[in-house]
Image (cartoon, rainbow, N blue to C red):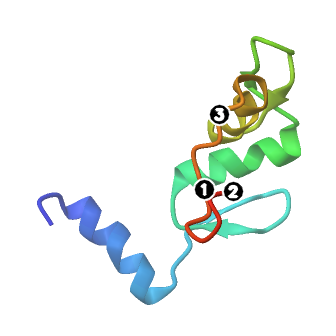
Amino acid sequence: FTVSSHLIQHRRFHTGERPFECTECGKSFLWRSALLRHWRVHSGERPYACTDCGDSFRQSAHLTQHRRTHTGERPYACADCGR
């Protein structure tokens, strides 16, 4: 590892350490960013809004997935049948 903090974070996979705990429900996380993302479950914050219909989401990936309902994009296909 080129940065010591990366080694510390990596060691958590081996030790099972999850130092970031939600004060609301007790769930714990490997990374602070995961705890902050989780906190939206309790706060109700939905910062990612669809410009087409106004639906909002807690995570940007969920907005990206939702946008496909408007565009018709289907980027994943079954290798067996093509669907």
Residue at label 3? 73
Q: Residue at x 75, y 47 (%)?
A: 39
Residue 76 placed where, x, y %? 59, 52
Q: Quadrant of residue 14?
A: bottom left
Q: Mark 3 or mark 2: which comes first in sequence?
A: 3
Q: Residue at x 56, y 73 (%)?
A: 18
Q: Are marks 3 and 2 in contact (CB under 8 Å)?
A: no
- CA gap, disc 1 and disc 3: 11 Å
Q: Residue lying furthest top in this view?
A: 51
Residue 47 placed where, x, y %? 73, 25
Quarter of the image for the C terminus: give it: bottom right
- CA gap, disc 3 and disc 2: 13 Å
Amino acid beneath label 2? Arg
Q: Which mark is residue 83?
A: 2
Quarter of the image for the N terminus: give it: bottom left
Locate residue 50 relative to residue 4 in the image: left or right.
right
Residue at label 1? 77
Q: Residue at x 88, y 36 (%)?
A: 44
Dot 3 falls on a residue whose secondary structure is loop
Depth check: give the residue in front, 19 or 6.
Answer: 6
- Asked whether residue 28 appears in the rendered view, the answer is yes
Locate residue 38 relative to residue 54 in the image: left or right.
left
- CA gap, disc 2 and disc 1: 5 Å
Depth check: give the residue in front, 58 or 6.
Answer: 58
